[in-house]
Amino acid sequence: MSKTDGGLSAAIPDTDAVEWRWSNHMSLLRRGCGLESSILMSYFGIGLHIIVAICFAVHAVQTRQNFYWLFILFVFPLLGSLVYFFAVLLPSLRQSRGGYAASRAIAQLVDPDRALREARTDFDRAPTVQHRMRLGAALLAAGRAGEALEQYQAAANGPFADDPGLLLGLAQAQFAVGNAAAASATLTRLFNANPQTRNQAEPALLYARALAAQGTADTRAAFEVALKCASDAAPRCLFADWLVQQANEADRERARGLYADIVQDARHWPRHAREHNREWLQRAQAALASMPAHG
């Protein structure tokens, strides 16, 4: 090769050397990025532990827990937070109404057949009237109204035939299978045997619904009674649903007012009340949206 060729060869970089340098450079870059990410994650983890510990410390002060919890939370933020959660926070949540509802919802989601399974086990072990009623209630909650009705009918043939809980459960099962006439007859029997139940929220509303399903003339009066002893928004919403179907314009205007009252009251409900009345609030909102505006 000539000198000219040799000079040209020297000017052109060796391909293997370039590739090696590039690979080495990228390796160092990746190593640096990985180290930086590890440092950031470490700081983030430490910061998160401190934030959780501070939140638990605020809870401890607000609920007047012993001050040694503050020492535990700040000296051992991770371990202390775990101990505080299981020893203090979780039991307090279970005792609250919202926490109890949440724990029930979680249990239902994880094991939806648990209540029914336990009720059946107890009944198989000891077939008492109480266990039969519990089994009927569990079947009804599981949507198996026909089987629930069989259990309640069997229980109603014994010495506890006039038991208020038994008669109410029987009426609920009868209504659930579509036999409104039998449900209203059972509730009349309940009211005659236990007059105080006539002004109780659950049987009063069920009686009004059973009469409405039959189209009887006493439906309006039954709903008025249910409104007076209401414990939630269900009677107002269901009464409004019935009023909307009537031919009288005054009835439809009263239905509008009942729906509006539910929506207005919902603004002041605490969280557990909103959860409990969610269905009725949504139905009231949808009904108001579908009703024609005032002229």
Image (cartoon, grey):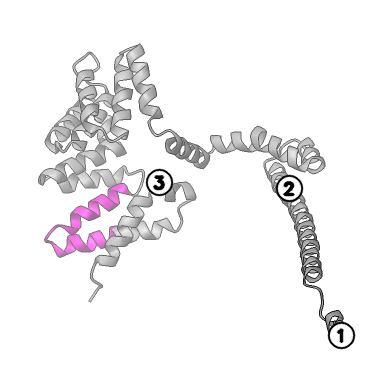
Q: Nearer the viewer, mark 1 or mark 2?
A: 1
Mark 1 or mark 3, earlier in chain: 1
Name the quadrant containing residue 33.
bottom right
Is 237 colored magenta in this rendering?
yes
Tell me the amino acid under the disc marked 2.
His
Residue 2, percent from left and from top: 87, 85
Q: Main secondary structure of the magenta part?
A: helix
Tell me the amino acid under the disc marked 1.
Ser
From which residue to which does the magenta span run? Answer: 234-258
Determine the residue positioned at 18% across, 46% down: 221
- For this rendering, which residue is in front, 135 or 32? 32
Task: Tell me if mark 1 has few (under 14), some (14-19) or many (20+) residues whose alpha carbon lies within 10 angstroms of its own.
Answer: few
Is 295 colored magenta in this rendering?
no
Mark identifier at residue 2: 1
Determine the residue positioned at 81% across, 69% down: 17
Report which residue position mark 2 lands on.
Answer: 49
Task: Tell me if mark 3 has few (under 14), some (14-19) or many (20+) residues whose alpha carbon lies within 10 angstroms of its own.
Answer: some
Tell me the amino acid under the disc marked 3.
His
Report which residue position mark 3 lands on.
Answer: 276
Q: CA distance from mark 1 to mark 2?
A: 71 Å
